[in-house]
Image: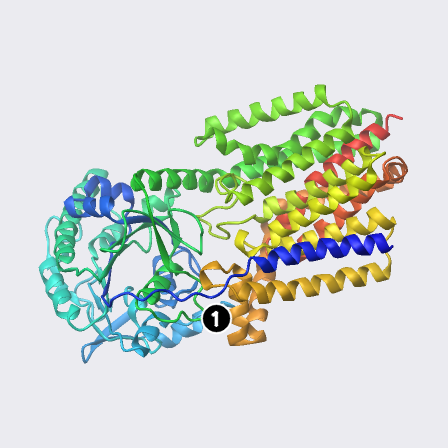
Amino acid sequence: MKKFKHNFLVLFLMGLLILISSVSGIAEASPRSQGKVILLVIDNISYDDIVRYGGENLHYLLEHGALGLMNTNSGGSYKDSNSYATIGSGNYAVCSAEGIYVKKQDGSIVNQDLSNLVQANGQLNRPIKVGLLGTLLNDKGFKTAVIGSESIVPEAEVAEARSALITMNQQGVTNYGQVDSSLLKKDEEHPLGYSTDYDALYTAYQKFSLQADFIVIQSGDTHRLNRYDHISKEELAKAKATIFNNIDLFLGQVLESLDQDSLLLVVTPFPAREDIAAGKKLTPIIAYGDFVPSGILTSSTTKRDGIVTNTDVAAEIVSFFDLEKDFSMIGHRLMYKSHEKPLDFIENINRIAVFNYKHRSDIIRTFILFVMAVLWLYVICMCCCPRNLVYFKPFLLAIMLLPTVFLLLPLFNPWNMAMFTFLVLLLTAIAVLITMFLFQDIIGFFSIFMLFSAALIVGDTLLGNPLMKVSILGYDPIVGARFYGIGNEYMGYLVGSTLIGTASLIEKARYHRRWAKLCNLIIFALVFFILASPSLGTNVGGAITAFLGFGTALVLMYKGKITKKDLLLLGTGIVVFLLILFVANGARRPEEQSHIGQLSQMVQQEGILALIQVAKRKLLMNYRLIKRSFWTQILLAMGIVLVGVFRHLAMAEISDCYPFLYNGFVAGIISAVVALLCNDSGVVAAATCLIPVVIPLLITTSYRFLK
């Protein structure tokens, strides 16, 4: 008992000491000489459009600016106005149902639907502040302006101006602006018969650049073209060529007027219809200025070179003017990285992101159907002819190996479906054959393979997740649920693999179990640190899962049973851990905080309401996933299989022959339950946690039935 308490304390302290050591002091950003921010909106385009149709000025930006791909998600349905609202709020917001209608009033632009806009965002279980960017600027004396007409009908009484969602303050007011039909002209070459009058647009820009510090310019034509339905490919290409030529000439004038202290942002808030259909939902964002190196963009929100989010735009503008970011803003300022071939780099990561986005659901669905088919046939065989269960071994091994194969697959650049399918089948078949012929000792195989898989995930995380970021089982920058660290798919697999790998290690080390237990303690501490460390992208649910799962394994490893005192110790430990994590992460600089650090800041400002909002949002997400996700079916199938194994008393035999492995199975099942309850996509984490737990159990069971 004393030895267990000592080792449990070592595990707890190792994780927390490493965690606390990652906390860094708060550093102030160095001030910049005051300039202006010009945000040029060219909506519904892609880098392909810029390369193909852009003139010398747009191509100049591609060569001398910092390029990025922007995630365009929002707090509601996937539509353009929601993305504009998100940019202006610095958080995932929505637009009101009626849309955005504004009118000119004493030189300012006023949102007429503000009350509905505020009400719509108040239902999101997020601390959304509509018009926050404009308010932060106005409060410090900076003025905003919006220029450009997005109207489809020039004669409309009110102008459509989604761009005002970016510039307005919390009263719905943009200080200056011109958004009416005076900025339009008749144009027979445009499909709608009229286009932006770029001479008038530049005149308005010159006027308001003398008054405003932050100016949003809406080019308008690409938005109108995207709204036009009846057009052939040839007509579309011709219209784009004309539109981009006009935009390019206008951009040249803006570049000439830009002083050395100002920042130009070229932003596409929302993709074109044809790009959405093709899965190309990441849009161009380009930063240009004397202090911006030629290269790529990133941010602490994504920690991924070349990828930022629409919530980062407001944070960048706030940072430019050296203002304090509001706690409700979840984005971070843009960071510029030099790169020799930024456009090639951007196009490559976009190609991979689009492949994963388009094919991820089909590939995962196929994997899940394969798992379910094997499991149901296993149950039938277990009930009817249990001695034939041994023939399931290659299929069970394939299930166990596939998550690791998916993680290694990016090394082969399989970014077309034919190559991807071929490599999955080939690598899995080779791995199964090697296992069948080289590992006659199944317990030894569990130890080697499970610890190898865990080490692969840990090593990949320490290197910045180069494999997981592009793995089909990793995370998707287009969906945007997570951009760095360990996602729930591999979090569950990591915890389950660690538990079974370490249990098998002790089982094999009959004459060196003292050293094996010490080795396990170190492995547990390392994996716990990987999941909990803010610098590696804290997975809070994963850290809780690991803490309770590893804690259970330690109790069983040293004592063989769990008492009420042990449960109390584990419960106290997890509460203390969460408090320290909460405080330590919140004390880091905003750019270094993970989600729990941002939550800590929100709690300081909003109190318990922030926790309630997050809890409601995560519970709702978990509920939706349980209802709709294919992973739920794996979870149910594995539950039924476990009941069947217990019913045939195989667990009792395994407990007698392999007591430490049995303890690993128990700890793994408990971890899956914790993962289900403590993650916003808990059904996914629980299912992947059970794969390295249930599959070895079934393989072991099939051998027991032969005796």
Left or right, residue 320 beside residue 583: left
Residue 568 in the image: state x and y as whole percent. 80, 63
Q: Tell me which amino acid carries mark 1.
A: Pro
Determine if residue 97 is in view: no
Q: What residue is at 23 percent from the left and 41 percent from the top? A: 51
Which residue: 60% across, 37% down? 456
Asked which quadrant contains residue 493, the reply is: top right
The secondary element bearing badge 1 is classed as loop
Is the N terminus in the top left, top right, bottom left or bottom right quadrant? bottom right
Residue 248 lies, in percent from the top left, at: 15, 50
Residue 234 visible at all: yes
In the rendered image, which quarter contains the C terminus?
Answer: top right
Residue farthest to the top?
437
Query: Which residue is the extreme one toward the bottom?
Result: 106
Q: Which residue is mark 1?
A: 127
Q: Is residue 444 left or right of residue 238?
A: right
Q: Please give the name of the residue rendered at 28% of the width and 50% of the height, measured from the top-left corner.
A: 293
Instruction: Answer left or right for 256 relative to 315.
Output: left
Q: Nearer the viewer, residue 504 or 462?
A: 462
Q: Nearer the viewer, residue 477 or 295?
A: 295
Using the rendered view, name the quadrant where residue 172 is placed: bottom left
Residue 539 higher or lower than 328, as above or below: above
Q: Toward the viewer: 617 or 135?
A: 135
The quarter of the picture where residue 615 lies is: bottom right
- Up-down relation of residue 649 to residue 442 (above or below): below
Q: Residues within 10 Å of mark 1 (few under 14, many from 20)?
A: many
